[in-house]
Image (cartoon, rainbow, N blue to C red):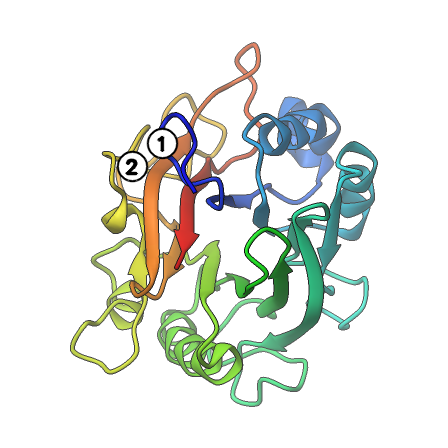
Amino acid sequence: MLSLNGISQEAMNVMTFNIRYSTSSDGINQWDNRKDFVAQTVLFHDVDLCGMQEVLYSQITDLEKRLPEYGWVGVGRDDGDKKGEFSPVFYLKKRFDLVETNTFWLNEHPEKLGYGWDARFNRIVTWAKLRDKITEKEVVIFNTHFDYKGEIARRESAKLVLRKVKEIAKDTPFLVTGDFNASPAQEPIQILTDELEAFYFVSSEKLSDTPHFGPRGTFTGFQEKERDNEPIDYIFVSGKNVEVSKHATLSNTWGGLFASDHFAVMAMLSFY
């Protein structure tokens, strides 16, 4: 079924957004001055699914108040409960029913909490299997944040994520959102998108029917423009049985203030 503008009414708006953890050391850019901007970004763009990164539990409670139509899943990376950063998945409750969710760690024993390889911090993947009330089909969204320091950790995390997504999603359509701390030409992204392998991801930007909108770079450091002209935040899909109509990096500000030190990345897509 198509709407008047040619976009399927079954299409979903998917976002990945590193919202920057709450710390008073950010001064004018501290969370209390940004939390409304983050919520407004989700609401204005009619987001159906959003993978966020660097989210502390106190920030989740702030977002719950501002996004009452959304459910969320996730755990803190430092104790499997509320300690440390989350990589939560927010979903629009009127669009999706939660079927199953879990979290695994990016390390040599992903079922167990702990650092992996040469990583500076614990790193996790939170996933949710959801039933779409419009299509009555299921989709699995995986959300993660790769280590910024450990080169081995990023490489091995990419291999692990490929394996776990294949294992968990099986034949169910999937999405992978996250801050991968790597540009498209760097090893982790090359591993994830290697078309010579039997199982690989495709950047939703590559599949978009319309040209990418906005800057390519996604990390800003609260500066006036992206620090690097390459993305490190992505929305990946399988490349099969999926259509991507639009892809964008959202670089707007509020009186010169940013919602985060990363731009949100968004794709409009549908599975068939």
- Whether tag 2 and tag 1 are in contact, CB under 8 A, the answer is yes
Where residue 35 appears, as percent x and y from the top left, is: 70, 30
Where residue 215 appears, as percent x and y from the top left, is: 31, 30
Relative height, residue 76 to residue 195 (above, below):
above
- Image quadrant holding the N terminus, namely top left
Note whether residue 44 is visible.
yes
Quick one: which residue is furthest to the front in this view?
1
Quick one: which residue is furthest to the bottom in this view?
109
Give amino acid for label 1: Glu
Give the spatial CA distance, label 2 vs label 1: 8 Å
Q: Which mark is residue 196?
A: none
115 vs 179, nearest the viewer: 179
User: Which residue, given by chain and number where applicable, does mark 1 sit on?
Assistant: 226
Picture residue at 40% right of the left edge, 26% below the top = 4
Lateral position of residue 69 relative to residue 181, left or right: right
Note whether residue 85 is visible.
no
Secondary-structure class at tag 2:
loop
How packed mark 1 is, by other alpha carbons closer than 10 Å (few <14, some 14-19, many 20 or more), is many
> Viewer-nearest of labels 2 and 1?
2
User: Which residue, given by chain and number where applicable, does mark 2 sit on?
Assistant: 216
Q: How many marks?
A: 2
Secondary-structure class at tag 1:
loop
